[in-house]
Image (tube, rainbow, N blue to C red):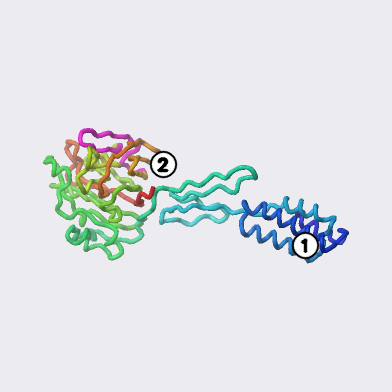
Amino acid sequence: MNVVDHLISSSGRVPGVTPDGLRRGRAALDGAIAARAQQESPAGRKAAAHWFSGLRRRAIIGVAGVAAVAAAAAAIALPSSPSHTAGKPLADSSAKPAGKAPAKPTGQTSASRSAPAGRAATPAVASPWRLVYSTNFQVNAPLGSFSGCKVSTGYTCSGLPAALRGQWWAYGDGWPDTATVRHLKVHGYYSPSTTVWIAGGMMNIRIWRGTGNVHSAALLPKAALGKKYGKYVVTFRVAHPVPGYKSADLLWAMETPTGGTAHEIDFPEGGWGLPFKAFIHYPSTRPQFSANASFDSTWNTTVLEWSPHGVSFYCNGKLIGSASGNVADVPMRWVLQNETEDNGTAGPPKNSSSTMQIKYVAYYSWAG
């Protein structure tokens, strides 16, 4: 039983009930409540006022009871509720087990509960990123859907279901991949209509080679097309990696870079079955950072953060490298590029294939 309940139960034994005592008791309790108001929630203040009304109806506040009520009010532990800063959780969420506190979503921060008297509460730090687009691939698209992909129609693939047409674009059938541009012996052409489909909550990109050229694929989330700065997130694996294929998720400049800044930022990049890295392509240098992870059957999540202050690369929640300053300052397009290995090796064997699987993609804009 709390102090107030004890006073109520003892009302018959409190002497000296007078109007003046009642007014002074009310003032004492109001003062105590006001002193707590800076820290407590509106619900707590309402509860305290309700308690006082109960006391008043029982007429237990007298001259002798003023000090007791003031002490009781100071001892009341009113419930407080945490305050939250505006943050953007990832759009896809899963059910939480009953009885457990829900996990805090990425990008959301919350303030600490009210600090004890005399100690300042720690202020919440707002995220500089704002979620623009995310998907865990709940809309299916059969093989052949990524067809009719043209720039002239506003970066659309006419074969896609209507629900996806505004979300994705791809380099069209017949466009040369990097190995072809570099005139390598084994090379390929982008062929999204024969390589890409969405099913089972995943985007599947099956690159293949018959007896001739490689059939490659490069996918572009339209929400990140032509943007200046951003946070780029992808969760992926290569189910059965075959040497000779590669991936290079990259930011590619859509305007001429200025003042020696980078025209290309790659992460993750590497051959399938091999470790991947991050690269920054300046005009005369190309710093690189190892991720300590590979394009294999293990699920990995990479994050590239590009802001006016620099670029940072994360793999599975760990910072693997960064570059400060004005790394790049023109609009870029984000490309999930999967194609022929272009490092001078023999390329993939004939009559082979390998599949990249992607189960989550997100783009955040810079709001810092």
**Disc 1 residue crowd, few under 14, some 14–19, many 20+, Cα 10 Å:** some
Residue at the image point whose x is 25% and y is 46% from the top: 330
Dots 1, 2 in contact, CB < 8 A: no
The mark found on residue 55 in the picture is: 1
Q: Secondary structure at mark 2?
A: loop
Q: Which mark is residue 92?
A: none
Magenta range: 275-298
Q: For label 2, count other residues whose C-alpha is less than 10 Å away and answer few (under 14), some (14-19) or many (20+).
A: few
Figure quadrant of residue 43: bottom right
Question: SS at mark 1?
Answer: helix
* Spatial separation of the CA atoms under disc 1 and disc 2: 55 Å
**Magenta region includes residue 287:** yes
Is residue 279 on the magenta stretch?
A: yes
Residue at 34 percent across and 38 percent down: it is 293
Closer mark to the observer between disc 1 and disc 2: 1
Q: Earlier in the sequence, mark 1 or mark 2?
A: 1
Residue in the picture at 29% in, 45% down = 240
Q: Is residue 292 above or below residue 82?
A: above
